[in-house]
Amino acid sequence: MESYPRINYLQALPNYRLFLIFDNGEIKIYSLSERLQSPAFAPLKDEALFNTVRLANGGYGVIWNDEIDLSEYELWVKGVEVSKISELVAKVA
């Protein structure tokens, strides 16, 4: 089984996005906008709940509560890499 980088840092961003720094130094932004259409993730449309996101033990994913979480695999594979500061500023703004 292939191993994926673990998450070292996490921050909730506006518009249902997550800012992630992985243990290999790569920075990615993951958008949950498509996921919010599924019943499992629909509760995250409540921004107060969305903003409670935290790292799972060991950086193996992110969790909101006992029912809603995402793996580091999902975040790594589908996150958009931020390779330059100017790109970061544009994506965060």
Image (cartoon, rainbow, N blue to C red):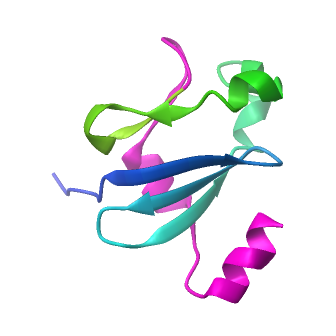
Quarter containing the C terminus: bottom right
Number of numbered callouts drawn = 0
Q: How far across and how far down the image is residue 72, in percent?
A: 39, 47
Q: Residue furthest left?
A: 1
Which residue is painted at 71% across and 87% down in the image?
Answer: 86
- Residue 81 on the magenta segment: yes
Q: How far across and how far down the image is residue 52, in percent?
A: 63, 27
Say whether residue 77 is left or right of residue 58. Answer: right
| Magenta residues (range) | 64-93
Q: Quadrant of residue 46?
A: top right
Q: Quadrant of residue 41?
A: top right
Say whether residue 15 is left or right of residue 40. Answer: right
Reply above or below: 85 against 75: below
Which residue is painted at 70% across and 44% down in the image?
Answer: 32
Reply above or below: 37 against 23: above
Reply above or below: 24 against 33: below
Which residue is painted at 36% across and 53% down in the image?
Answer: 8
Which residue is painted at 80% across and 77% down in the image?
Answer: 90
Q: How far across and how far down the image is residue 48, in percent?
A: 77, 24
Say whether residue 30 is left or right of residue 6. Answer: right
Reply above or below: 56 against 64: below
- Residue 45 on the magenta segment: no
Say which of 36 and 21 sits in front.
Answer: 21
